[in-house]
Image (spheres, grey):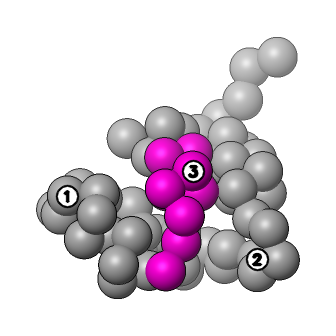
Amino acid sequence: MNLTQEQAMEIASRKARRHDAISPAERDMIIAQLERFPLPVVKRNTGRSYVTLLRIAQVAL
C-alpha cells in the first residue's frame, strides 16, 4: 500500500497517541522542533514520550 506523506503522518500520530490526541498543529510544531533541537530538548518542551517523538520523526523527517 502506497501512502502519501500526510497519510503516513496521520497514521504515525494515531499510533503514537495514548490518551491525548496529537493535533495537526501540535504535530507540525513537534516536527519543527525535531529539525532544530536535540531529542531530549523536544521531549522536555512537548511532554511527549520518546516513543511518540520517534514515531513522528520516522515518518516526517
**Secondary structure beneath disc 3?**
helix
* Above or below 32: residue 10: above
- In the image, 31: left or right of 4? left
Chain-order first, disc 2 or disc 1 = 2
Q: Secondary structure at mark 1?
A: loop
User: Which residue is disc 2 drawn over?
Assistant: 21
Quadrant (top left/top right/bottom left/bottom right) for the C terminus:
top left
Residue at the image position 74 percent from the left and 20 percent from the top = 2
Vertical order, 30 against 60 (above or below):
below
Q: Amino acid at mark 1?
A: Pro
Name the kind of residue labelled 3 in the image. Answer: Val
Q: Residue 49 appears at what percent x and percent y?
A: 54, 64
Residue 51: say if magenta.
Answer: yes
For the record, the magenta segment spans: 47-55
Front residue of 21/48: it is 48
Q: Quadrant of residue 25?
A: bottom right
10 Å neighbourhood of mark 2: few (<14), some, or many (≥20)? few
Which residue is at a point 18% across and 63% down the rendered structure image? 37
Q: What SS does tag 2 mark? A: loop
Of tags 3 and 2, the one toward the viewer is 3
Q: Position of residue 23 (x, y in %)?
A: 66, 78
What residue does disc 3 label? Answer: 51
**Rendered residue at 32%/70% (across/down):** 42
Q: Amino acid at mark 2?
A: Ala
- Which disc, if any, is residue 38? 1
Q: Is residue 9 something one can see in this rendering? A: yes
57 to the left or right of 33: right
Please tell me how crowded label 1 is: few (under 14), some (14-19), or many (20+) other residues with Cα within 10 Å: few
Residue in front for this viewpoint, 30 or 40? 40
Query: In terms of sequence position, does the residue under pointer 3 or pointer 1 come before the other?
Result: 1
**Label 3 neighbour load within 10 Å: few <14, some 14-19, many 20+:** few
